[in-house]
Amino acid sequence: MADARLFFRKYSEIYTVFLPLFGVFLVIYTVLITFSSRHPYLQPGLPIDDSDTLLYLHHSLVSIPSVTTNEHAAAQFLQSYLTSKGWAVEIQPVSSHPVRENVYAYRGLKRNTRVLFSSHIDTVPPFIQYSVHDGYIWGRGSVDAKASVAAQITAAEDLLSSSVVASEGDISLLFVVGEETDGIGMITANELGLNWETVIFGEPTELKLAVGHKGLILGDLYATGKASHSGYPDLGINANYYLVEALYKLQNLDYPYSDLLGNTTFNAGTIEGGVAANVVPASATAGVAVRVAADLDGVLSQMQKAALEVPHLDINITLSYPPVLCDYDVPGFDTVAVAYGTDIPHLEGSHKRYLYGPGSILFAHADNERISEKELRDSVEGYKELAAAALGNKHDMASDRKELVRQE
């Protein structure tokens, strides 16, 4: 009898511990199952089923990390895909260390086409994996600008498989690197020796035609001082003080305004100075950006003058281009002016310039970057409309779509 009581007491203690734990596990499991059924999550990786060209391309591209300077894998994917679909593909080296390349594609033997679809394959950091939940497609580049890349390829293939355009000499594709930093990809693309009547640039415009975008000035400020012990500041020269003074002056300049593009805006993006709180800093630097709505030369002059008024300070302008005006003469599109920069000013030529794409710039570069499938699909139709208009095609695109659906 004593042995029996000992046995039951021993195992009742085990049940006392493990039954509550089992209950907690059961609750957690139930919640996870319920959540996953309501919010399906797609694991990253290339999809196997490519029957839906648009979603396949978008999923594939977003799943490939391509933060600026690391675009090689994305370029390789595009080369492989476009070659398999019958495009003639040229890989244009941009740099060898690291390996970076642009992708240019056309049909047949005619490299120089009337219309060009173009966007960029690099993204800002950090990489964010592809997923689908809450009614949106999420991930780095899902908006900026792999949505445009996927939609442009899909639109071009749709047009080539219909009676809207010829198979050669009408449409080509150019996908470049480096748009998020210095535009080196598009600058290098000028060496292709090509020109087009119309270039349709893909960036997030919420399916509206952009009337233009602001210019850009990127610059670095350098303040030079003299280090000393903070207990004896009169023996040193505090570089931080001069840097702060310069930033204040630049922030409060009377920058020009444009009725079309709005205010010129200033941003101090990075600041660095000093080695410790108890050391007078001998050097300080800042990286600044100005979104220019009007009068690029005037703004540059303002900045240089303000910098000269601050002792121990130098300013170095690393990149600048004026405000960009775009074409928006295709009926049926809403219009918008955007404040961000693009590769448009880096591509030389007298071509017409359309700026259009799916997604909102308010989600681009953010940790919640996302786009809806509907907007992605709608952009394909928008790109087709723009290309057809640029080619002077008189087809009714809506009728063509209905005919394609009927044939399917």
Image (cartoon, rainbow, N blue to C red):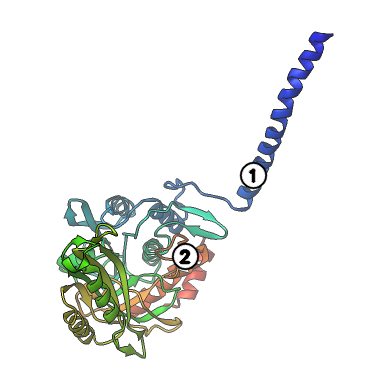
- Per the image, the residue denoted by label 1 is 33
- Per the image, the residue denoted by label 2 is 376
Please identify the quarter of the rendering in which residue 283 is found: bottom left
Q: Name which residue type carries label 2.
A: Leu
Q: Secondary structure at mark 1?
A: helix
Give the residue at x 17% y 62%. 227
Distance from label 1 to label 2 (Cα)? 29 Å
Q: Foreground mark, 1 or 2?
A: 1
Give the residue at x 16% y 77%. 311
Q: Name which residue type carries label 1.
A: Ile
Q: Is residue 378 left or right of residue 272?
A: right
User: Which comes sooner in the sequence, label 1 or label 2?
Assistant: 1
Q: Mark 1 packing: few (<14 Cα in 10 Å), some, or many (20+)?
A: few
Q: Position of residue 276 (x, y in %)?
A: 27, 57
Q: Is residue 214 left or right of residue 382?
A: left
Q: Position of residue 35 (x, y in %)?
A: 63, 49
Q: Mark 2 packing: few (<14 Cα in 10 Å), some, or many (20+)?
A: many
Q: Is residue 298 left or right of residue 386?
A: left
Image quarter where the N terminus lies is: top right
